[in-house]
Image (spheres, helix red, strand yellow):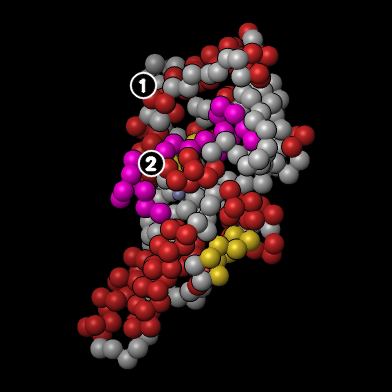
Amino acid sequence: MVSVDKAGRAPDLSENTGKDPLELASRELKRLYLAAPHDYQSGKRKFQFQNKLYGHPLIKQALIEAQHGKCCFCEAKVKHVAHGDIEHFRPKGAVRQSPDGHTIRPGYYWLAYRWENLFFSCQICNQHFKKDLFPLEDPARRALDHRQSIDPERPLLLRPDEPCIEDHIRFQAATATPARRSPRGTASIQLYGLNRPDLLDSRLNKLQLVRNLISLWNSDLPDTLRQPIGDNLRLHFAPGAEYLAMLRDNFPDFNP
Ligand SMILES: [Zn+2]
């Protein structure tokens, strides 16, 4: 994971009408909830979220640009092989504290259309690993509906746009490890599946390639050969490059 910078990129969907469709949809969800809170808590009623709103092309495009086309968790280039998901950091329809924990309903429905809660991710990270998991340091502080504040919550999962993710996750070769036994690093590595075998393989290939390139670049080559290798290496360390956090940790002093 690398810190995503989404600041100032929220698209305006109001089309100069003065009415933000995301805000209107959020208000409607709150109204529905207040009319029958127990039904939504028990799961008897469920919200119908509008994918065309939170997954609006302008929102998706803004997220893809902010994240350089990479998954906010695993840093794979999603757009090369898939459409990708709009990921809700706080799950919109139901929440679990742990993989074997019970389902808490109705989830963070009031954040379903909030820009701050949206990220772009690959389907494997979102649908196979994170799903509706959102563990808190103290589950008793969880906001259970829109009348409660999320401010007292202390999420165990790292938020893709928080600064200093490297204080919690570091890479030893291709393997993600919690920095200084960070509980948030531990939870994020586990629940985002950051060491799943396919991903680990992919990172290892990248690491070996870059290691070989650096070793060539440092060797006694004529400039005509060295320069294109340097150009290639710069691409591997550009913001849009895959697995940048791993490369930075393995080659902290590298500056082509
Ligand atoms: Zn991913």
Q: Is residue 114 magenta?
A: no
Counting other residues with Cα less than 10 Å from the Cα at mark 2, is it few (<14), some (14-19), or many (20 or more)? many
- Residue 225 sits in quarter: bottom left
Q: Is residue 81 magenta?
A: yes
Q: Amino acid at mark 1?
A: Glu
User: Image point 39% across, 67% down: which residue?
Assistant: 206
As helix, strand or loop, the secondary structure at mark 2 comes to: loop
Q: Position of residue 9 (x, y in %)?
A: 44, 39
Q: Is residue 29 above or below residue 177?
A: above
Q: How many marks?
A: 2
Residue 223 shows which numbered tag? none
- Distance from disc 1 to disc 2, alpha carbons, whole Å, reads 26 Å
Does mark 1 have its CB less than 8 Å from ligand 1?
no
Residue 84 shows which numbered tag? 2
Residues in magenta, as a range: 76-96
Does mark 2 have its CB less than 8 Å from ligand 1?
no
Q: Judge whether residue 244 can be spotted in this image.
A: no
108 to the left or right of 137? left
- Which quadrant: the C terminus? bottom left
Q: Judge whether residue 223 can be spotted in this image.
A: yes
Counting other residues with Cα less than 10 Å from the Cα at mark 1, is it few (<14), some (14-19), or many (20 or more)? few
Q: Earlier in the sequence, mark 1 or mark 2?
A: 1
Q: Which residue is mark 1?
A: 15
